[in-house]
Image: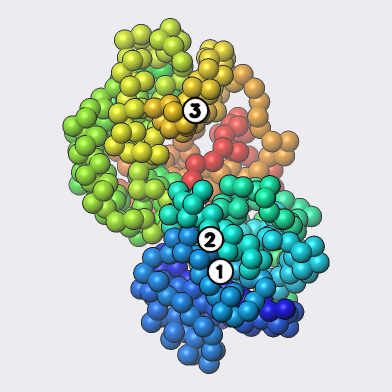
């Protein structure tokens, strides 16, 4: 009964060949794991990879003196992946596949054995581990099932099959008809998913998490011990910003009741100069490498005369995406078409194996009627324009437009109607929507929450671990909810890494349930951007 150990090497994994683990790369360490599988079951190693990194892959294999079959393609779609699963298992007369990404340096042999044992004992078609940090566990797939999924990905689920391979591709396809497959799950005693740990070397942030985990001396530890060490290390919980909220202008069209007006004036500097913005994006790219850049922090981005050039500046960096949160009132066919041309000409995002769009649009509606729109935003007149902007944007940016409803006591009675309408696939947003939590900004605004959704146990705040908020003059706020209070630096004048390091102490304190004067009054800690 033969098992194929298939490793997937993506060119979008930016640090797969970095030799940062005592002279070894994550690519080499994943191959070390693959060789150990032979101690568990009769197996053979197969490498699937992007043709653009064929040379690097073969060089590493040669240096390791390792012989294995390799299949390189110019492009890997989900259908191509399953098609090759089916082909190679037939060629090798193999019954099962163990699948993992080749940039995962800590794939665990203990959990590998457990997954394989369960997969074989229960004659499963697909077996995976759940609850553990990502990157530590492989997936097991039956060879016959791979053939079924290959067929499914070019027929009933052709839309899924045409997508680029990402880290969740196997389960993403299976879940489209999940009741048709025999699935086994190895579940962690403790659920580590809430920490959103990704132990792969696809991005700079994940590489940093991996090197910090390796520095803890985990080589001979159990999977549970490794997971426990990871969630107790502040250098793993806080790596690099993945979301930058930039105030390119302080101008607004509407005075909404859930938005404070304290930021409306920045010493007469209404617009961030394009030259300053370009320099800032260069810093962000060098520091974080991979991130989503919002141009809508405390201002209507569509007011900025250089908005198209700013979007182009972000998208020139292949690992940065752009987000625009707008009231939609200034959106026109001409502007949408111009921005679409910029987006279309930009290269696909290098996302380290995760799904990342070039651009995201959020349209703030917060109501389902003109009357409620006036109550929230102070005017009847803009409702139709705001509503119609969703369809206009969807025309140019399909599947990238999200109408948003900020949930408050004042509009709670329209939440169901809003959800029912916009979640319909036939709606102007094609079923996309966001229901946003109300933020009182550390109790600056009245408490308007219709429900308390905070977890029973408080976690270290996501925003001070993953976000950076930069105001129009370059000032960096302690966090978004602090507004102009607690400025910790200036992104135009200082290194971003120096500013970012000033939040380390707060993360350490929060891990020990100690909170600053801002944080103790805030309940945004459990909300998450990117």
| Secondary structure category for the residue under label 2 | helix
Q: In the rendered view, how is the structure colored?
A: rainbow
Residue 126, image quadrant: bottom right
Residue 363, image quadrant: top left
Q: Which mark is residue 424?
A: 3
Marks 2 and 3 sit apart, C-alpha to C-alpha, by: 29 Å
Task: Tell me: residue 309, above or below residue 437.
Answer: below
- Residue depicted at 61% across the width and 19% down the height: 450
Task: Tell me: residue 185, above or below residue 176.
Answer: below
Q: Give the camera-side residue of 490 and 307.
A: 307
The residue labelled by disc 1 is: 86
In percent of width and height, residue 32 lies at 61, 81
The residue labelled by disc 2 is: 150
Marks 3 and 1 sit apart, C-alpha to C-alpha, by: 36 Å
| Secondary structure category for the residue under label 3 | loop
Contact check, label 1 and label 2, Cβ < 8 Å: yes
Image position of 180 (left or right of 187): left
| Secondary structure category for the residue under label 1 | helix
Task: Tell me: residue 330, above or below residue 514.
Answer: above
Q: Give the camera-side residue of 209 and 40.
A: 40
């Amino acid at each position: 009964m033969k098992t194929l150990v298939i490793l997937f090497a993506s060119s979008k994994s930016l640090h797969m060949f970095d030799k940062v683990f005592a002279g070894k790369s994550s690519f080499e360490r994943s191959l070390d794991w693959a060789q150990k599988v032979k101690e568990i079951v009769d197996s053979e190693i197969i490498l699937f990879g992007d043709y653009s990194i064929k040379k690097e892959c073969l060089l590493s294999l040669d240096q390791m003196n390792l012989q294995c079959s390799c299949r390189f393609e110019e492009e890997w779609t989900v259908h191509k992946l399953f098609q090759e699963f089916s082909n190679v298992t037939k060629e090798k007369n193999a019954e099962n596949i163990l699948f993992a990404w080749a940039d995962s340096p800590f794939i665990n042999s203990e959990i590998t054995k457990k997954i394989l044992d369960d997969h074989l004992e229960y004659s499963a078609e697909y077996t995976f581990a759940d609850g553990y940090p990502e990157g530590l566990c492989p997936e097991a797939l039956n060879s016959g099932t791979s053939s079924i999924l290959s067929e499914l990905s070019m027929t009933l689920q052709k839309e899924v099959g045409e997508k680029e391979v990402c880290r969740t591709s196997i389960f993403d396809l299976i879940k489209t008809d999940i009741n048709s497959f025999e699935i086994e799950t190895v579940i962690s005693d403790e659920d580590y998913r809430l920490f959103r740990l990704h132990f792969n070397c696809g991005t700079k942030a994940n590489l940093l998490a991996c090197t910090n985990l390796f520095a803890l001396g985990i080589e001979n530890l159990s999977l549970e011990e490794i997971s426990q060490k990871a969630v107790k290390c502040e250098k793993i919980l806080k790596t690099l910003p993945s979301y930058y909220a930039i105030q390119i202008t302080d101008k607004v069209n509407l005075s909404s009741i859930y938005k404070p007006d304290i930021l409306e004036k920045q010493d007469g500097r209404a617009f961030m100069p394009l030259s300053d913005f370009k320099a800032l994006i260069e810093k962000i790219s060098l520091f974080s490498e991979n991130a989503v850049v919002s141009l809508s922090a405390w201002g209507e981005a569509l007011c900025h005369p250089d908005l198209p050039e700013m979007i182009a500046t972000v998208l020139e960096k292949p690992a940065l995406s752009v987000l625009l949160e707008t009231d939609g009132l200034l959106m026109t066919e001409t502007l949408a078409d111009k921005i679409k041309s910029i987006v279309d000409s930009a290269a696909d995002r290098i996302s380290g194996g995760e799904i990342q769009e070039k651009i995201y649009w959020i349209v703030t509606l917060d109501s389902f009627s003109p009357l409620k729109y006036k109550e929230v935003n102070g005017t009847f007149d803009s409702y139709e324009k705001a509503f119609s902007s969703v369809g206009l944007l969807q025309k140019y940016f399909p599947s990238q437009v999200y109408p948003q409803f900020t949930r408050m006591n004042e509009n709670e009675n329209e939440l169901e109607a809003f959800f029912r309408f916009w979640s319909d696939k036939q709606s102007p947003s094609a079923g996309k929507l966001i229901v946003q939590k109300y933020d009182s900004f550390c109790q600056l605004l009245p408490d308007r929450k219709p429900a308390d959704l905070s977890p029973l146990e408080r976690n270290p705040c996501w925003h001070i671990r993953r976000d950076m908020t930069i105001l129009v003059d370059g000032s960096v706020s302690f966090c978004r909810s602090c507004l102009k209070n607690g400025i910790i630096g200036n992104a135009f004048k200082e290194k971003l890494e120096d500013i970012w390091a000033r939040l380390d102490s707060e993360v350490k304190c929060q891990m020990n349930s100690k909170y600053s004067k801002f944080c103790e009054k805030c309940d945004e800690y459990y909300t998450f951007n990117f």
